[in-house]
Amino acid sequence: MGAPPRPRPLPGERASHDATFRAFVKLAAERGRESGGHHHRNYVLPLTEGMARMVGGEAGTSVTVRMRRPDALRVVIRTWQDEAGLLAAVRGALPHAPRCLVKRGDVAIHSFAEGVPLSGVCDHGKPVDTPMVRALAGLLARTAQVRRGALPALPAVWPRNDTDSHGFLRTLAHLADQQIRRPNRDGFGGLFAALGIPEDALAQLAGRVPAMARRPYSLLHADLHRDNVIVSYAGDPPLVCVDWELATYGDPLHDLATHLVRMRYPAHQWAEVVDAWAEAMREVRPAAVNGLAKDLRHYLAFERAQSVFPDVMRAARSLEESFTRTREESFTQTSLDEATAEVRRALDAAAEPLRLVGVPGEGEIRRALFRWLVSRTNGGIRDRAWIAKASEWRPDRRMPERPDFPPAAVREALLAEGAAPAGRVFKGTAHLNTVVSVPGFDAPVVVRRKLAEVCRRERGFLSEHAVLRAIEESSVGVAAPRVLALGETYQSDTIALHTYVGPRDVDRPPNHPVHGLLPHEADGLVDQLCALTRVRYKQVDPAAGEGAFHRWLREQLISLVRDLPKESQQLARHLGLPDADRLRLILSRYEVSHREPALLHGDLNPWNLVRRDDRLALTLIDWEMAVVGDPLYDLVRHMHLTPTRPEIRDRMFRRWERRLPAEYTRDWREDWRVYRRLEIVRSAYVDLDRIVTGASMDAPNVRRAVDSYAVTLAVATGSLGLPVRSTANPCLARALA
């Protein structure tokens, strides 16, 4: 039974109580035994005479002073803000749970649970003995007996049906987005984007929640791990559960899932824990185990998915704190390695439930964390002598320094890169692009960082910076970025800095014609392709124009097929795609007429086109696949990569033929289908390899291509005159479809 209610103090007594409370809290901070958590500092000390009179206790009795950390990251879902109300609610079912004796603002004094934390006698990752497992399951079962009427009011977003498991999990996913990701977007959004975590990852997860069995809602602790379980000295009861601030009300399977993950049981013990929980729950609420075998995995997936956000933020924050505490580079390098390992573990765990693709390797994670750290100004991090290495810049001698963008501007751009918000970070197939503002430069700048761990099957042949300089110096009507600088950083990353060509409001994402071109955009693109014929391409490729472009292109495709990994070649053969030698034999039947060469973009997919508000209509970005060759190829490849309605295709061909001299367009009506066949076949191999290897799957153009692979395969084999081979494995057939 709890203590009888104390009468409300008179005004004079209230002032005296406040003074007593402040003095006791100060004493706790000075002399109390500290046990800190992520969200609170907890100090254990005996009640003073004055404090004992105030709370109606006995002087000398130990209590816990809980102080909320003002600088704590917002990394948890909270259903209720007042832990004191929850502690009062659980007293009936769990009489030995702590009581809130008094609370002032963010400081509360709780009764102290005599004992030792379970983590002190059984470390994380070690198996828990069977009696202890049963006792833990009993704790969760008794928690489920707390009546809803005793609990504080639930938020308005809560499902109205108290058995709606599907609705509860959807609510959790939305709350994780609202309470964890969004409040931390300014400080960590750019880091999440650099690590390949989409902004809508949790929203997408909420939309994928499947139908589940109905289970009656109950009170859930939602954070029952080894630090929050006290093994009592007296043994009656054997275990006491503390720290109820994350408690919620919903599907009891959620409590089991968080317990399984956060207790860090060894894998072989999970089945024992699940069985013990089911046995304990059947005694108090049998319907709680409905659909256990089928639905538990959905809550486990959610726990791993949402945990990537707090885990990444805590790793980054701990890294920042270690840099602030020490000036020794060797120590901070160790901290960087530890943070990298923690982030990699979190990304691997969240990859499947969040459908992350292309999870970065340790090198890419380490560089992303380092850039984030360098961008921080707290604690004077940017004033450290050795941290200045982060902005070291080794310019590439092939790119002369621009008077309007000196080395000092480059350093400012690199320092700003790690602090960019999520909306200014764009991850492509081979580059991480970050939009920053540079003092003294009148336009936004893109820091274009080459991803070192990306393996691209389609090779580039010209230097992107040389192509963009040639376009700029030719002064033709082509909308393309300007190159501001080129070089390497302290971490040996290849960096290019370009002018940004997106919206004037850099916090709005660029608008790409992902569903195809509008008529005026088709006209603008054709006009720019025609203008490319006037660029002096010899300065970027002195040997251009010698030999037949189509034959060279065909040989590049055959080499690509020959160099595919063994696994990709094996699946290609299984699906009826020819090997390199047979492919050469088939494709050698087709030739095209000679046309005058010109500079080509080489990869005009929709995400390399940015809408603009002038007669050019589109800016052409990402020129790393540029090549000198047949102008017809650029137009046909664009139509292959972009949804193009027949009327838009005809419009583009007519305008292109009308605006170019005959030496660039002759015989195009007979030849364009030859290039189209080549691109269809190329996609069949390249996209299949991406399915096998998972390469570049986080790029939107790759994702869309892979999603329609069954159609690509059928069209490719048909264009080669080969039958579509039905696979003997129906699961494989469904996956490719």
Image: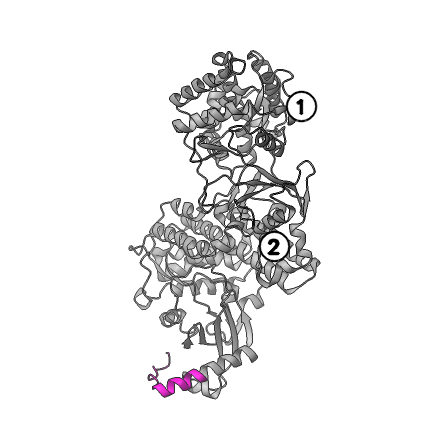
Secondary element at image label 2: helix
Image location of residue 124, percent across then percent down: 57, 61
How crowded is the residue under tag 1: few (<14 C-alpha within 10 Å), some, or many (20+)? few
Q: Quadrant of the C terminus?
A: top left
Tell me residue 333's x, y (percent): 67, 56
Which residue is disc 2 drawn over?
A: 374
Instruction: Categorize mark 2 by other alpha carbons within 10 Å: few (<14), some (14-19), many (20+).
Output: many
Q: Which of the two residues, 194 or 697, is positioned nearer the viewer here?
A: 194
Above or below, 462 relative to 198: above
Q: Quadrant of residue 331?
A: bottom right
Reply above or below: 344 against 147: above
From this view, report whether residue 541 is shown above or below residue 424.
above
Tell me the kind of residue under disc 2.
Val
Tell me residue 302's x, y (percent): 45, 51
Magenta stretch, residue numbers: 1-19
Q: Mark 1, mark 2: which one is toward the viewer?
A: 1
Q: Residue at x 59, y 20 (%)?
A: 553
Name the residue carrying label 1: 542
